[in-house]
Image (cartoon, rainbow, N blue to C red):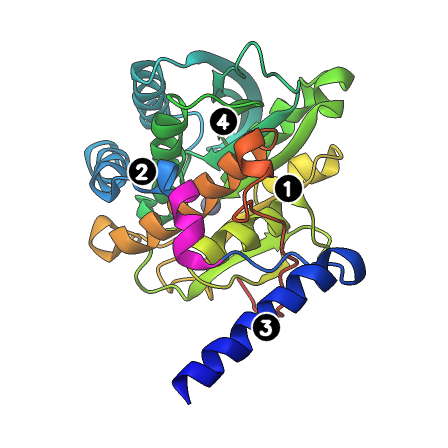
Amino acid sequence: MKKLSKLFITILVAVGLVILPTTLKVEASPPSKPASQAFDNKIVKKIDKEKIYNHVYELSVDIGIRVAGTKEEKEAIDYIVSQYQSYGLDVEVQPFEFQRREDGEIVTKTSHNVIATKKAHKNHDTGEIIYVGSHHDSVPGSPGASDNASGIGVNMEIARILSKMPTTSEIRFVTFGAEELGLLGSKHYVSTLTEDEKNRSMGMFNFDMVGSENAGEMIMFTVDGERNIITNTGASSSLRVSDSLTYGQVGRSDHQSFHDAGIPAAVFSYAPLEPEYHQPTDTIDKISKEKMEEVAKVVSASIYQLARKQTPALDHSNVAPEPVEPPYEDRPL
Ligand SMILES: [Zn+2]
């Protein structure tokens, strides 16, 4: 029995070898998880959830409430600048003014965006730009541990790791001021992009509220409810390094500004939202290191997939990542 089946298999393989190249179109199958991990592990194994947590602690406990235009927001900005600089990135602080009512009077305040740029490898530069964004301000009265110190922590950890990897695209890590006042920082940032920069923009990954142990499962949201390069790359990398990922339709965070400027964008979050959203109880004790680590893995693998797409070894590898179309899910944020 054993011998017979071996012989049978040998014949099948021999026949298959003759037939396959001539008559059958070989479909690419989804990469097996362990095989693809060799590629993704170059990035995701370096994610350090303790480093992410320490950023959230610094922002939400040591600095605390970070309302746009206050000295606490500026302290957060100074901290973010020092971290990005320590990774060897070029850092620009971009001020912008806004008006708000205080004690019945209209006053002019200043907030800032922080832009840290990782240049593409000079001999392998596609000219494309990938954005990784998160807002650093919080609402009055809330330390904003999940909203959105968590998003800043994940953003900076990905910056730390990718700053040391050769990439074919430029990657801009941006933190926005005054998101809570109506996406003011991201609106200002995209208004400063030239037409050439917009044309070279591949897409924008946004993090908002990625740290609460009381929130639901990870999900991506686009402004128009359509898939794009961000959702499809995110779904692909999530299958490899985490789990299947769905997407839904929500604006209301900084990906909206990029979408409005014609740049494909999606926000990564956990939904349904935590009950502490915009409350004084959005504090460090509700923060899940594992949730922040998970989204950091998915997005860092996604960025590396996009920013290494012309690597010949990958193109000829049976584990080369392909975009995956995630299913739509009508889940509220
Ligand atoms: Zn937020």
Q: CA distance from mark 1 to mark 3?
A: 51 Å
The amino acid pointed to by label 2 is: Ile
Closer to us: mark 2 or mark 3? Answer: 3
Residue 268 appears anywhere in the view: yes
Q: Which residue is mark 2?
A: 65
The answer to the question of whether label 4 and label 2 lie on touching residues, with beta carbons closer than 8 A, is no
Alpha-carbon span between mark 2 and mark 1: 28 Å
Residue 72: x %, y % from top left: 31, 27
Q: Earlier in the sequence, mark 4 or mark 2?
A: 2
**For mark 1, does the 10 Å Cα neighbourhood hold few (<14), some (14 to 19), or many (20 or more) residues?**
many
Which type of secondary structure does the marked residue at label 4 adopt? strand
Dominant secondary structure of the magenta stretch?
A: helix
Magenta residues, start to end: 32-40
> Looking at the picture, which amino acid does disc 4 mark?
Val
In this rendered view, identify the residue nearer to me: 252 or 66.
Answer: 252
Q: Which residue is mark 3?
A: 11
Q: In the image, is 118 to the left or to the right of 210?
A: right
Q: Label 3: state its secondary structure.
A: helix
Marks 2 and 3, how far apart in space?
Answer: 71 Å
Q: Tell which circle, 3 or 4, labels the residue nearer the N-terminal end.
A: 3
| Residue identifier under label 1 | 265
Q: Amino acid at mark 1?
A: Ala
| Residue at screen point 35% across, 55% down | 279
Per the image, is 33 magenta? Answer: yes
- Classify mark 3: residues with Cα within 10 Å, few (<14), some (14-19) or many (20+): few
Check contact, mark 2 vs mark 3: CB within 8 A.
no
In the rendering, at what x and y percent does residue 275 appear? 37, 65
